[in-house]
Amino acid sequence: MTTLESARICEGLSKKEHIVSLCEDPSPTCGSSSVMRHAIPIERKLYEEDGTPFQTHVFIRSEHCELLCNDISCSKCIQKEKSLGKMKSSTSKKTTAPLKGNAPLTGSSKERLIATV
């Protein structure tokens, strides 16, 4: 019981643009994303005065989030954030590299064409 009482709710992933763009609402037909958006209602006494009539706090979590943890985020969310960070950095490196000599121009991005020129 003391372990459960000392546990904290996982804060999930950061709300950086590359993570938010991947997240989906939970559904029974689980989509292709492993990042989920969870909205939890806020108590009416904590509502912002000029906000919407139904206010929520949004968390972005890994699909396999443990929800209760001893730290700010659970191990699954920490691993997912690291892997998404690595994916973003490798994608950004790939998009700014110039094209090779005989590479087709149709499948390349505008940034890669500019870097090639």
Image (cartoon, rainbow, N blue to C red):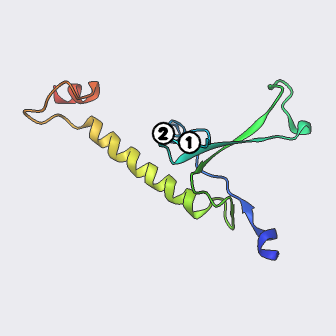
Query: Residue at position x 40%, y 51% from top?
Result: 86
Query: Residue at position x 27%, y 41% from top?
Result: 94
Outermost residue to the right: 45
Placement of 44 over or under 90, stated as above or below: above
Question: Closer to the camera, 64 or 98?
Answer: 64
Question: Closer to the camera, 12 or 96?
Answer: 12
Amino acid type of the residue that numbered disc 2 sits on in the rendered structure: His
Placement of 14 over or under 51, stated as above or below: below
Q: Which residue is mark 2?
A: 18
Q: Is residue 33 left or right of residue 49?
A: left
- Crowdedness of circle 1 by 10 Å Cα count: few (<14), some, many (20+)? few
Q: Is residue 7 left or right of residue 114?
A: right
Expressed as whole percent of the image width and height from the top left, the position of residue 48 reads: 84, 31
Outermost residue to the bottom: 2
Query: Residue at position x 22%, y 25% from top?
Result: 114
Q: Which residue is mark 1?
A: 29
Expressed as whole percent of the image width and height from the top left, the position of residue 96 reads: 27, 35
Quadrant assignment for the C terminus: top left
The part of the image, by quadrant, that contains residue 95 is top left
